[in-house]
Image (cartoon, grey):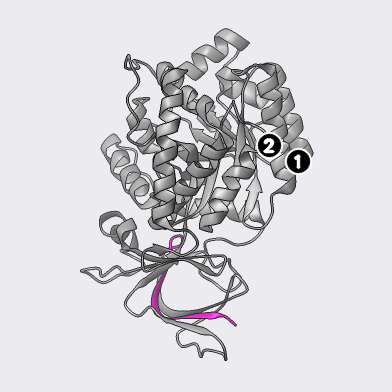
Amino acid sequence: MGTVLKGGTVIELEPANVERVDLRVEGGLIAARAPMLAAQEGDEVVDVNGKVVMPGLVCAHHHLYSALARGMPPAQPAPESFAEILERVWWRLDRALTLDSIHVSATVGAMDALLCGTTTLIDHHASPSAIEGSLTRVARGVNEVGLRGILCYEVTDRNGLEGRDQGLMENASFIRKAQGRFRGMVGAHASFTVGHEALQMLRQLVESTGAPLHIHLAEDPADEKLSFERYGDVPVTRLLDHGLLSAGTVVAHAVHLSWPELSQVIGTGAWLVHNPRSNMNNEVGYAPAGKFGSRSTLGTDGIGADMFAEAQLAYFRAREAGLPVDVMKMLANGHRLVSKAFGMEVGPMREGAVADLLVLDYRGPTPLTPENLEGHLLYGLGSRHVESVMVDGIWRLWARRPLSVNPDVVTEQSRKTARELWSTMAAL
Protein backbone atom coordinates (compact mmCIF):
# COMPACT_ATOMS: atom_id res chain seq x y z
CA MET A 1 0.00 0.00 0.00
CA GLY A 2 1.15 3.51 -0.76
CA THR A 3 0.06 7.12 -0.81
CA VAL A 4 -0.87 8.98 -4.00
CA LEU A 5 -0.70 12.79 -4.01
CA LYS A 6 -3.02 13.95 -6.77
CA GLY A 7 -2.87 17.20 -8.71
CA GLY A 8 -0.14 19.04 -6.82
CA THR A 9 2.27 21.61 -8.21
CA VAL A 10 5.55 19.82 -7.56
CA ILE A 11 8.63 22.02 -7.30
CA GLU A 12 12.35 21.29 -7.11
CA LEU A 13 14.95 23.86 -6.16
CA GLU A 14 18.03 23.26 -8.31
CA PRO A 15 17.71 23.06 -11.16
CA ALA A 16 14.46 24.94 -10.67
CA ASN A 17 11.49 22.89 -11.80
CA VAL A 18 7.72 23.41 -11.51
CA GLU A 19 5.36 20.75 -12.80
CA ARG A 20 1.77 19.75 -12.14
CA VAL A 21 2.09 16.00 -11.53
CA ASP A 22 0.95 13.19 -9.26
CA LEU A 23 3.33 11.41 -6.91
CA ARG A 24 3.06 7.91 -5.51
CA VAL A 25 4.91 7.12 -2.28
CA GLU A 26 5.60 3.59 -1.11
CA GLY A 27 8.13 2.09 1.28
CA GLY A 28 9.45 5.52 2.28
CA LEU A 29 10.37 6.43 -1.31
CA ILE A 30 8.81 8.25 -4.23
CA ALA A 31 7.75 5.24 -6.28
CA ALA A 32 6.21 6.99 -9.29
CA ARG A 33 5.73 10.42 -10.83
CA ALA A 34 3.41 11.16 -13.75
CA PRO A 35 0.75 13.66 -14.90
CA MET A 36 -2.01 11.15 -14.12
CA LEU A 37 -1.31 8.26 -11.75
CA ALA A 38 -3.90 5.59 -11.08
CA ALA A 39 -4.15 4.54 -7.45
CA GLN A 40 -3.53 0.91 -6.66
CA GLU A 41 -5.76 -1.16 -4.41
CA GLY A 42 -5.27 -0.08 -0.80
CA ASP A 43 -3.56 3.22 -1.63
CA GLU A 44 -4.29 6.34 0.36
CA VAL A 45 -5.30 9.06 -2.12
CA VAL A 46 -4.67 12.67 -1.06
CA ASP A 47 -6.07 15.50 -3.17
CA VAL A 48 -3.48 18.29 -3.18
CA ASN A 49 -4.97 20.13 -6.14
CA GLY A 50 -4.00 23.79 -6.04
CA LYS A 51 -1.27 23.21 -3.46
CA VAL A 52 2.51 23.18 -3.71
CA VAL A 53 4.49 20.01 -3.02
CA MET A 54 8.21 20.48 -2.38
CA PRO A 55 11.16 18.80 -0.65
CA GLY A 56 11.40 19.01 3.12
CA LEU A 57 14.06 21.53 4.11
CA VAL A 58 17.40 20.98 5.88
CA CYS A 59 18.93 22.97 8.74
CA ALA A 60 22.62 22.25 8.25
CA HIS A 61 23.79 23.69 11.59
CA HIS A 62 21.56 23.72 14.66
CA HIS A 63 21.76 23.69 18.46
CA LEU A 64 18.51 22.11 19.60
CA TYR A 65 19.20 22.85 23.26
CA SER A 66 18.80 26.55 22.47
CA ALA A 67 15.03 25.97 22.25
CA LEU A 68 15.01 26.38 26.04
CA ALA A 69 16.79 29.74 25.79
CA ARG A 70 13.95 31.56 24.06
CA GLY A 71 12.87 34.46 26.29
CA MET A 72 15.53 33.60 28.86
CA PRO A 73 16.39 36.37 31.36
CA PRO A 74 19.33 38.37 29.96
CA ALA A 75 22.78 37.86 31.41
CA GLN A 76 23.90 40.43 33.94
CA PRO A 77 26.07 42.33 33.44
CA ALA A 78 25.31 42.39 29.73
CA PRO A 79 27.99 40.72 27.58
CA GLU A 80 30.13 43.18 25.64
CA SER A 81 31.93 40.75 23.33
CA PHE A 82 31.40 37.41 21.63
CA ALA A 83 33.63 35.72 24.19
CA GLU A 84 31.44 37.09 26.98
CA ILE A 85 28.28 35.90 25.18
CA LEU A 86 29.74 32.40 25.20
CA GLU A 87 30.88 32.55 28.82
CA ARG A 88 27.85 34.26 30.37
CA VAL A 89 25.07 32.74 28.25
CA TRP A 90 25.77 29.58 26.24
CA TRP A 91 28.46 27.98 28.39
CA ARG A 92 26.30 28.50 31.48
CA LEU A 93 23.27 27.06 29.69
CA ASP A 94 25.03 23.96 28.42
CA ARG A 95 26.55 23.30 31.88
CA ALA A 96 23.06 23.41 33.38
CA LEU A 97 21.63 20.79 31.00
CA THR A 98 20.63 17.37 32.29
CA LEU A 99 19.77 14.30 30.23
CA ASP A 100 16.07 15.00 30.82
CA SER A 101 16.26 18.66 29.77
CA ILE A 102 18.29 17.63 26.70
CA HIS A 103 15.46 15.28 25.72
CA VAL A 104 12.80 17.94 26.27
CA SER A 105 14.72 20.57 24.29
CA ALA A 106 15.20 18.17 21.38
CA THR A 107 11.51 17.29 21.30
CA VAL A 108 10.23 20.85 21.39
CA GLY A 109 12.94 22.04 18.98
CA ALA A 110 12.08 19.26 16.53
CA MET A 111 8.37 20.05 16.80
CA ASP A 112 9.14 23.67 15.96
CA ALA A 113 11.16 22.49 12.95
CA LEU A 114 8.30 20.25 11.79
CA LEU A 115 5.87 23.15 11.82
CA CYS A 116 8.34 25.15 9.71
CA GLY A 117 8.74 22.41 7.09
CA THR A 118 12.27 21.45 8.14
CA THR A 119 12.58 17.68 7.98
CA THR A 120 16.32 17.16 8.66
CA LEU A 121 18.31 18.68 11.52
CA ILE A 122 22.12 18.60 11.59
CA ASP A 123 22.67 19.27 15.27
CA HIS A 124 25.77 20.27 17.22
CA HIS A 125 25.27 19.42 20.90
CA ALA A 126 27.06 20.30 24.17
CA SER A 127 26.16 19.41 27.78
CA PRO A 128 29.34 19.18 29.93
CA SER A 129 27.44 18.00 33.03
CA ALA A 130 25.63 15.24 31.12
CA ILE A 131 27.78 13.96 28.27
CA GLU A 132 27.33 10.19 28.26
CA GLY A 133 24.08 9.28 26.54
CA SER A 134 23.32 12.87 25.55
CA LEU A 135 23.16 12.21 21.81
CA THR A 136 20.81 9.29 22.36
CA ARG A 137 18.50 11.64 24.26
CA VAL A 138 18.68 14.20 21.44
CA ALA A 139 17.86 11.43 18.97
CA ARG A 140 14.90 10.26 21.06
CA GLY A 141 13.42 13.74 21.10
CA VAL A 142 13.84 14.18 17.35
CA ASN A 143 12.53 10.66 16.74
CA GLU A 144 9.37 11.30 18.77
CA VAL A 145 8.48 14.08 16.34
CA GLY A 146 9.47 11.94 13.35
CA LEU A 147 12.26 13.98 11.79
CA ARG A 148 15.62 13.00 10.34
CA GLY A 149 18.78 13.89 12.30
CA ILE A 150 22.56 14.01 11.96
CA LEU A 151 24.03 14.52 15.43
CA CYS A 152 27.39 15.17 17.06
CA TYR A 153 28.83 16.16 20.42
CA GLU A 154 31.07 19.22 20.79
CA VAL A 155 34.60 18.10 21.71
CA THR A 156 36.54 20.81 23.56
CA ASP A 157 39.26 21.27 26.17
CA ARG A 158 37.32 23.94 28.05
CA ASN A 159 35.86 21.32 30.42
CA GLY A 160 39.15 19.58 31.15
CA LEU A 161 40.66 16.38 29.80
CA GLU A 162 37.91 14.20 31.25
CA GLY A 163 35.23 16.25 29.50
CA ARG A 164 37.22 16.16 26.26
CA ASP A 165 37.58 12.38 26.38
CA GLN A 166 33.92 11.85 27.28
CA GLY A 167 32.95 14.01 24.30
CA LEU A 168 35.08 11.90 21.97
CA MET A 169 33.55 8.71 23.36
CA GLU A 170 30.01 10.07 23.02
CA ASN A 171 30.62 10.84 19.34
CA ALA A 172 32.11 7.40 18.75
CA SER A 173 29.28 5.64 20.56
CA PHE A 174 26.51 7.43 18.68
CA ILE A 175 28.17 7.06 15.27
CA ARG A 176 28.36 3.29 15.82
CA LYS A 177 24.72 2.83 16.78
CA ALA A 178 22.99 5.48 14.62
CA GLN A 179 20.57 3.92 12.16
CA GLY A 180 17.27 4.55 10.40
CA ARG A 181 16.64 8.29 10.20
CA PHE A 182 19.83 9.08 12.18
CA ARG A 183 23.53 9.41 11.45
CA GLY A 184 26.45 10.69 13.49
CA MET A 185 29.26 13.16 12.86
CA VAL A 186 32.36 14.06 14.88
CA GLY A 187 31.72 17.35 16.64
CA ALA A 188 34.23 19.97 17.80
CA HIS A 189 33.98 23.44 19.26
CA ALA A 190 35.96 26.27 17.70
CA SER A 191 39.74 25.95 17.35
CA PHE A 192 40.49 28.29 20.25
CA THR A 193 39.16 25.73 22.77
CA VAL A 194 40.67 22.64 21.12
CA GLY A 195 44.33 21.85 21.80
CA HIS A 196 46.82 19.95 19.65
CA GLU A 197 46.21 16.62 21.36
CA ALA A 198 42.45 17.04 20.98
CA LEU A 199 42.86 17.74 17.26
CA GLN A 200 44.95 14.60 16.90
CA MET A 201 42.28 12.57 18.67
CA LEU A 202 39.56 14.10 16.50
CA ARG A 203 41.53 13.11 13.40
CA GLN A 204 41.84 9.55 14.68
CA LEU A 205 38.10 9.41 15.34
CA VAL A 206 37.25 10.74 11.88
CA GLU A 207 39.52 8.14 10.30
CA SER A 208 38.30 5.22 12.43
CA THR A 209 34.58 5.95 12.00
CA GLY A 210 34.53 7.45 8.50
CA ALA A 211 32.26 10.18 9.88
CA PRO A 212 33.05 13.79 8.92
CA LEU A 213 33.89 16.63 11.30
CA HIS A 214 31.32 19.30 12.23
CA ILE A 215 33.04 22.42 13.63
CA HIS A 216 32.63 26.14 14.24
CA LEU A 217 35.23 28.14 12.32
CA ALA A 218 36.07 31.86 12.45
CA GLU A 219 32.70 32.88 13.85
CA ASP A 220 34.41 35.79 15.59
CA PRO A 221 37.95 37.29 15.43
CA ALA A 222 38.51 35.73 18.86
CA ASP A 223 38.85 32.32 17.20
CA GLU A 224 41.99 33.40 15.34
CA LYS A 225 43.38 35.59 18.13
CA LEU A 226 43.03 33.00 20.90
CA SER A 227 44.05 30.07 18.68
CA PHE A 228 47.29 31.84 17.85
CA GLU A 229 47.95 32.87 21.46
CA ARG A 230 47.24 29.42 22.90
CA TYR A 231 48.43 27.07 20.17
CA GLY A 232 50.77 29.09 17.96
CA ASP A 233 48.78 29.13 14.72
CA VAL A 234 45.51 30.24 13.11
CA PRO A 235 42.48 27.92 12.95
CA VAL A 236 42.54 27.04 9.24
CA THR A 237 46.24 26.12 9.35
CA ARG A 238 45.74 24.03 12.48
CA LEU A 239 42.83 22.12 10.95
CA LEU A 240 44.67 21.56 7.68
CA ASP A 241 47.80 20.40 9.49
CA HIS A 242 45.75 17.79 11.33
CA GLY A 243 43.88 16.66 8.19
CA LEU A 244 40.53 17.81 9.54
CA LEU A 245 39.33 19.80 6.55
CA SER A 246 38.20 17.53 3.74
CA ALA A 247 35.24 16.67 1.54
CA GLY A 248 32.29 16.20 3.85
CA THR A 249 33.54 18.39 6.72
CA VAL A 250 30.79 20.72 7.93
CA VAL A 251 32.17 24.18 8.68
CA ALA A 252 29.79 26.57 10.43
CA HIS A 253 30.00 30.38 10.12
CA ALA A 254 33.34 31.19 8.41
CA VAL A 255 32.74 34.89 9.03
CA HIS A 256 36.34 35.98 9.59
CA LEU A 257 38.52 34.23 7.04
CA SER A 258 40.97 35.93 4.72
CA TRP A 259 40.40 35.26 1.02
CA PRO A 260 43.38 32.86 0.87
CA GLU A 261 42.04 30.98 3.91
CA LEU A 262 38.54 30.80 2.44
CA SER A 263 40.00 29.48 -0.81
CA GLN A 264 41.86 26.78 1.13
CA VAL A 265 38.68 25.70 2.90
CA ILE A 266 36.66 25.66 -0.32
CA GLY A 267 39.42 23.67 -2.02
CA THR A 268 39.07 20.84 0.49
CA GLY A 269 35.46 20.20 -0.55
CA ALA A 270 34.09 21.09 2.88
CA TRP A 271 30.51 22.29 3.31
CA LEU A 272 30.31 25.92 4.46
CA VAL A 273 27.18 26.66 6.48
CA HIS A 274 25.96 30.25 6.51
CA ASN A 275 23.98 31.30 9.63
CA PRO A 276 23.01 34.91 8.89
CA ARG A 277 20.46 35.52 11.65
CA SER A 278 22.80 34.23 14.34
CA ASN A 279 25.71 36.25 12.96
CA MET A 280 23.62 39.40 13.12
CA ASN A 281 22.26 38.60 16.58
CA ASN A 282 25.76 38.05 18.01
CA GLU A 283 27.17 41.06 16.14
CA VAL A 284 30.09 39.03 14.86
CA GLY A 285 30.11 40.60 11.39
CA TYR A 286 28.96 39.67 7.91
CA ALA A 287 30.00 36.35 6.40
CA PRO A 288 30.75 36.78 2.67
CA ALA A 289 28.51 33.83 1.77
CA GLY A 290 28.44 34.91 -1.86
CA LYS A 291 32.08 33.73 -1.97
CA PHE A 292 31.52 30.40 -0.20
CA GLY A 293 31.63 28.42 -3.42
CA SER A 294 29.55 25.56 -4.75
CA ARG A 295 29.20 23.72 -1.42
CA SER A 296 27.58 26.44 0.66
CA THR A 297 24.36 25.84 2.55
CA LEU A 298 22.24 27.30 5.34
CA GLY A 299 21.82 26.75 9.07
CA THR A 300 20.32 28.66 11.97
CA ASP A 301 22.91 28.13 14.74
CA GLY A 302 20.02 27.48 17.11
CA ILE A 303 17.69 30.37 16.18
CA GLY A 304 14.76 28.07 15.51
CA ALA A 305 14.61 25.99 12.36
CA ASP A 306 12.66 28.16 9.92
CA MET A 307 14.69 27.73 6.75
CA PHE A 308 12.30 29.85 4.69
CA ALA A 309 13.08 32.80 6.98
CA GLU A 310 16.80 31.99 7.02
CA ALA A 311 16.97 31.86 3.21
CA GLN A 312 15.10 35.12 2.83
CA LEU A 313 17.28 36.93 5.37
CA ALA A 314 20.40 35.50 3.75
CA TYR A 315 19.30 36.81 0.37
CA PHE A 316 18.39 40.33 1.47
CA ARG A 317 21.43 40.78 3.72
CA ALA A 318 23.69 39.62 0.88
CA ARG A 319 22.05 42.10 -1.49
CA GLU A 320 22.68 44.87 1.02
CA ALA A 321 26.33 43.83 1.27
CA GLY A 322 26.75 43.70 -2.51
CA LEU A 323 27.65 39.98 -2.39
CA PRO A 324 24.54 38.21 -3.74
CA VAL A 325 23.90 34.57 -2.86
CA ASP A 326 22.00 31.83 -4.65
CA VAL A 327 19.63 30.70 -1.89
CA MET A 328 17.98 28.09 -4.14
CA LYS A 329 21.34 26.37 -4.51
CA MET A 330 22.12 26.77 -0.81
CA LEU A 331 18.87 25.07 0.18
CA ALA A 332 19.41 22.32 -2.40
CA ASN A 333 22.95 21.81 -1.05
CA GLY A 334 21.40 20.94 2.28
CA HIS A 335 19.72 18.02 0.51
CA ARG A 336 23.01 17.03 -1.12
CA LEU A 337 24.79 17.04 2.24
CA VAL A 338 22.07 14.83 3.77
CA SER A 339 22.01 12.54 0.73
CA LYS A 340 25.73 11.91 1.15
CA ALA A 341 25.34 11.20 4.86
CA PHE A 342 22.52 8.69 4.36
CA GLY A 343 23.68 7.19 1.10
CA MET A 344 20.38 7.83 -0.66
CA GLU A 345 18.76 10.67 -2.55
CA VAL A 346 17.07 13.24 -0.32
CA GLY A 347 15.59 16.31 -2.00
CA PRO A 348 14.79 15.39 -5.62
CA MET A 349 11.06 14.85 -6.16
CA ARG A 350 11.81 11.94 -8.45
CA GLU A 351 11.36 8.19 -8.52
CA GLY A 352 13.68 6.45 -6.08
CA ALA A 353 14.25 9.49 -3.87
CA VAL A 354 13.35 9.54 -0.17
CA ALA A 355 9.82 10.81 0.47
CA ASP A 356 10.64 13.76 2.73
CA LEU A 357 8.22 16.38 1.43
CA LEU A 358 5.96 19.29 2.28
CA VAL A 359 2.46 20.22 1.18
CA LEU A 360 2.00 23.99 1.23
CA ASP A 361 -1.30 25.83 0.92
CA TYR A 362 0.25 28.61 -1.14
CA ARG A 363 -2.04 30.56 -3.47
CA GLY A 364 0.42 32.74 -5.32
CA PRO A 365 -0.99 35.92 -6.88
CA THR A 366 1.04 35.31 -10.05
CA PRO A 367 1.88 32.22 -12.14
CA LEU A 368 4.48 29.88 -10.63
CA THR A 369 7.12 28.84 -13.17
CA PRO A 370 10.70 27.57 -13.09
CA GLU A 371 11.84 31.04 -14.17
CA ASN A 372 10.20 32.85 -11.26
CA LEU A 373 10.36 30.15 -8.56
CA GLU A 374 13.09 32.02 -6.70
CA GLY A 375 10.91 35.14 -6.62
CA HIS A 376 8.05 33.18 -5.04
CA LEU A 377 10.45 31.65 -2.51
CA LEU A 378 11.86 35.04 -1.53
CA TYR A 379 8.75 37.18 -1.58
CA GLY A 380 5.88 34.78 -0.93
CA LEU A 381 6.48 31.24 0.30
CA GLY A 382 6.97 30.82 4.01
CA SER A 383 6.57 28.46 6.93
CA ARG A 384 3.05 29.81 7.47
CA HIS A 385 2.03 27.95 4.30
CA VAL A 386 3.21 24.54 5.55
CA GLU A 387 0.09 22.43 5.87
CA SER A 388 1.34 18.85 5.95
CA VAL A 389 4.74 17.17 6.23
CA MET A 390 5.87 13.68 5.25
CA VAL A 391 9.16 12.16 6.42
CA ASP A 392 10.31 8.76 5.16
CA GLY A 393 6.91 8.31 3.54
CA ILE A 394 5.01 8.82 6.83
CA TRP A 395 2.77 11.81 7.54
CA ARG A 396 4.21 13.65 10.53
CA LEU A 397 2.17 16.86 10.24
CA TRP A 398 -1.39 16.99 8.97
CA ALA A 399 -3.47 20.16 8.73
CA ARG A 400 -0.86 21.94 10.90
CA ARG A 401 -1.19 19.34 13.66
CA PRO A 402 1.76 17.12 14.68
CA LEU A 403 0.65 13.50 14.54
CA SER A 404 3.15 11.70 16.78
CA VAL A 405 3.36 14.15 19.70
CA ASN A 406 0.78 16.21 21.57
CA PRO A 407 1.83 19.85 21.16
CA ASP A 408 0.10 20.91 24.37
CA VAL A 409 1.95 18.27 26.41
CA VAL A 410 5.30 19.03 24.73
CA THR A 411 4.92 22.76 25.32
CA GLU A 412 3.84 22.37 28.95
CA GLN A 413 6.84 20.13 29.68
CA SER A 414 9.18 22.49 27.85
CA ARG A 415 8.04 25.52 29.83
CA LYS A 416 8.46 23.67 33.12
CA THR A 417 11.92 22.46 32.10
CA ALA A 418 12.96 25.94 30.93
CA ARG A 419 12.09 27.45 34.33
CA GLU A 420 14.14 24.78 36.09
CA LEU A 421 17.06 25.28 33.68
CA TRP A 422 17.07 29.04 34.14
CA SER A 423 17.06 28.60 37.92
CA THR A 424 20.05 26.26 37.70
CA MET A 425 21.89 28.73 35.47
CA ALA A 426 21.30 31.54 37.94
CA ALA A 427 22.91 29.45 40.68
CA LEU A 428 26.05 28.58 38.69
Hey, which residue is sitting farthest right in the picture? 208
Q: To which quarter of the image does residue 250 belong?
A: top right
Decide if residue 203 is on the left or right side of residue 280: right
Residue 268 position, x and y percent, is 62, 36
* Number of marks: 2
Count residues near mark 2 (Cα–Cα under 10 Å), then give few for <14, some for 14-19, many for 20+.
Answer: many
Q: Amino acid at mark 2?
A: Asn
Q: Is residue 418 above or below residue 311?
A: above
Q: Is residue 29 above or below residue 111?
A: below
Q: Would you say residue 5 sits in the magenta stretch?
A: yes
Q: To which quarter of the image does residue 298 belong?
A: top left
Q: To which quarter of the image does residue 210 belong?
A: top right
Identify the element where label 1 is drawn.
helix
Q: Give the quarter of the figure containing the N terminus.
A: bottom right
Q: Would you say residue 400 sits in the magenta stretch?
A: no
Q: Contact (CB < 8 A) between labels 2 and 1?
A: yes
The reply to whether residue 409 is in sight is yes
Q: CA distance from mark 2 to mark 1?
A: 10 Å
Q: Amino acid at mark 1?
A: Thr
Count residues near mark 1 (Cα–Cα under 10 Å), then give few for <14, some for 14-19, many for 20+.
Answer: some
Residue shown at the point (67%, 23%) measured from the top left:
164
Q: Which mark is residue 171?
A: 2
Looking at the picture, tell me which residue is in the foreground, 190 or 273: 190
The reply to whether residue 337 is in sight is no
Residue shown at the point (39%, 77%) measured from the top left:
8
Q: Which mark is residue 2?
A: none
Mark 2, mark 1: which one is toward the viewer?
2
Magenta span covers which residues? 1-16
First-in-chain label (2 vs 1): 2
Decide if residue 410 is on the left or right side of residue 175: left
Identify the element where label 2 is drawn.
helix
Q: Which mark is residue 209?
A: 1
